Image: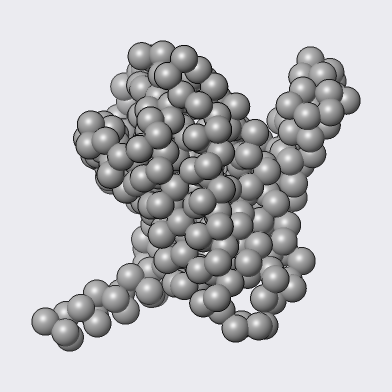
Amino acid sequence: MKEIFIKIKNLVSSVLSTVAECIVPNLPIMIGVGMLKVMLIVLGPNVFHLLKETSDTYIVLSFVADAGYYFMPIFTAVSSADVFHTDRHLAALIGAMLLSPAYIEAVKAGRSLSIFSMPIAMTDYGSQVISSIIAIRIMSYICAFLEKHLNKNLKPILFPLLTILIMIPIAFCAIGPLGVFLGNRLVDLILLLKDLGPIGNAFMCAIIPFITIGGLGGANLSAMLLLASAGVDPILFFSNVLYNNILGFVTLALYLRNRNPETLASAITAAIGGTSEPALFGIVMKDRKALASLCIGGFAAGLLSGIFKVKSYAMASFGTFGIVTTIGPDSSIVHAAISMIVGCIIGFVLSYLSHNKHE
């Protein structure tokens, strides 16, 4: 039994390490657009009101910041190609085809598509990273096989053509359905946790890092919209606000230990900007102590918010300012603030004490 546990542990560590390797090269993009979002929050209508949401400057900066995340499947595909030692340009195409405007329009219109008589899972891959990593890993095996077996005279034509033709059904008909299945099960889990009271809130907040790592943000949003349709969200939105702020403080503790400027930028992006990817993928996911600190802090904060019956009445940024959505007839922003502060303190202290200086 012990040997099985060690093998599972090593497998999980290997998978997380590989995912991190594929994502870390994109940190400059994540941090850059994350800080851009922070700037928009501070200068925009949420704080200083120096930029109106209808101004050209605000609109341009917003869509540039959104582009950094929306096209992450392409960026991740390229960096994954480097990790798996395969063709970067074909990898970029695989990432890009998941975001093809015609495909996205079909998804939004609710159309059904198929390829070679195989049904395509109609899902929006924008901002996703896991799908790209899996696709490029599979593509690396296909490329290696074709490289070895194709006639050298036909290779310049058949190598890219066959790679693309093989990857289209794999990406759209195999990887896509897996994501849809996991997403649907996640929505079921969230609705189950909602009915469990405070302990459900605790587990919800604790597992959000793994939802993000698993690339299931779309399902997270779907569940959020489903809950919001009832006029109040008793579990999910504020759990995301708690998660981002606790993540920011866990990362801040690491910055105080290693004094790495990127760590500080990631902490600010998570807490204020509500954008977790730089801190989670670039720093915390590779550090089991930090990840444990984040989950424990999240569990405590979620439990308190459940006991206090904190609810969200609107959707906004997942950053610090998202706390204002808890103001309502059956919810107190004071209780929300207490939950957030307790979770941030626990996450910060655990993260700080579990690491040595310069670790």
Of the pair 135 and 305, the residue shown nearer to us: 305
- The residue at the point 49 percent across, 43 percent down is 339
Location of residue 120 in the rendering, given as x and y in whole percent from the top left corner:
31, 33
Question: Is residue 119 shown left or right of residue 345?
Answer: left
Location of residue 14 in the rendering, given as x and y in whole percent from the top left corner:
38, 74
- The residue at the point 28 percent across, 44 percent down is 199
- The residue at the point 59 percent across, 32 percent down is 322
Location of residue 165 in the rendering, given as x and y in whole percent from the top left corner:
38, 47
- The residue at the point 33 percent across, 70 percent down is 12
Of the pair 87 and 183, the residue shown nearer to us: 183
- The image quarter containing residue 169 is top left
In which quadrant is the C terminus drawn? bottom right
Question: Is residue 133 shown left or right of residue 74?
Answer: left
- The image quarter containing residue 76 is bottom right
Location of residue 301 in the rendering, given as x and y in whole percent from the top left corner:
44, 47
In which quadrant is the N terminus drawn? bottom left
Of the pair 57 and 247, the residue shown nearer to us: 247
Tell me: residue 169, above or below residue 156.
Answer: above
The colour style of the image is one colour
Of the pair 160 and 220, the residue shown nearer to us: 220
Question: Is residue 58 shown left or right of residue 224?
Answer: right
- Whether residue 260 can be seen here: yes
Question: Is residue 332 shown left or right of residue 205?
Answer: right
- Whether residue 67 can be seen here: no
Tell me: residue 251, above or below residue 236.
Answer: below
- The image quarter containing residue 54 is top right
Tell me: residue 276, above or below residue 254.
Answer: above
